[in-house]
């Protein structure tokens, strides 16, 4: 990973940090990756104690994640929720 990619990775981690912490309280775990177009795919996994009613629908999650990434060099590709695996 070069310095530019490391800086971009750090900015995505920072942009999603508050959301990640909030989700972990309900036993959801957020991870992200860059696709071939350098867009961010966010995947949310449910833990064994996950609050099934606490997860927002995909369009809402995509709006939240897209807004969170607005201060980074990346844009959102998609959000994958546990029921979409």
Image: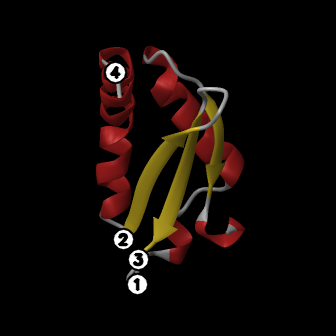
Residue under label 1: 48
Q: Quadrant of the N terminus?
A: top left
Vertical side of 22 occupied by 64: above or below = above
Kindly report the distance in space between the C-alpha atoms of the residues bearing marks 1 and 4.
37 Å
Mark linked to residue 2? 4
How packed is label 4: few (under 14 Cα within 10 Å), some, or many (20 or more)?
A: few
Vertical side of 45 occupied by 58: above or below = above
What residue do we see at 40% from left, 84% from top?
Answer: 48
Circle 3 sits in a helix, a strand or a loop, which is it? loop
Circle 2 sits in a helix, a strand or a loop, which is it? loop
Mark 2 and mark 4 in contact (Cβ < 8 Å)?
no
Kindly report the distance in space between the C-alpha atoms of the residues bearing marks 1 and 2.
7 Å
Mark linked to residue 9? none
Circle 1 sits in a helix, a strand or a loop, which is it? loop
Mark 3 and mark 2 in contact (Cβ < 8 Å)?
yes
Q: Quadrant of residue 28?
A: bottom left
Q: Position of residue 79 (x, y in %)?
A: 62, 48
What residue do we see at 31% from left, 25% from top?
Answer: 6
Q: Position of residue 55 (x, y in %)?
A: 54, 62
As drawn, the residue found furthest toward the front would be: 1
Q: Quadrant of the C terminus?
A: bottom right
Q: Nearer the viewer, residue 36 or 15?
A: 36
Q: Quadrant of residue 10?
A: top left
Kindly report the distance in space between the C-alpha atoms of the residues bearing marks 1 and 3.
4 Å
| Horizontal side, residue 84 vs residue 14: left or right | right
| Horizontal side, residue 76 vs residue 73: left or right | right
Q: Earlier in the sequence, mark 1 or mark 4?
A: 4
What scheme was used to colour the molecule? secondary structure
Mark 3 and mark 1 in contact (Cβ < 8 Å)?
yes
| Horizontal side, residue 29 vs residue 80: left or right | left
């Amino acid at each position: 990973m070069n310095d530019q990619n490391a800086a971009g990775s750090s900015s995505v981690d920072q942009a999603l940090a508050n959301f990640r912490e909030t989700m972990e309280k309900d036993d959801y775990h957020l991870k992200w990756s860059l696709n071939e177009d350098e867009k961010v795919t966010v995947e949310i996994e449910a833990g064994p104690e996950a609050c099934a009613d606490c997860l927002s629908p995909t369009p809402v999650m995509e709006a939240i994640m897209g807004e969170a990434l607005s201060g980074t060099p990346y844009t959102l590709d998609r959000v994958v929720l546990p029921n979409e695996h």
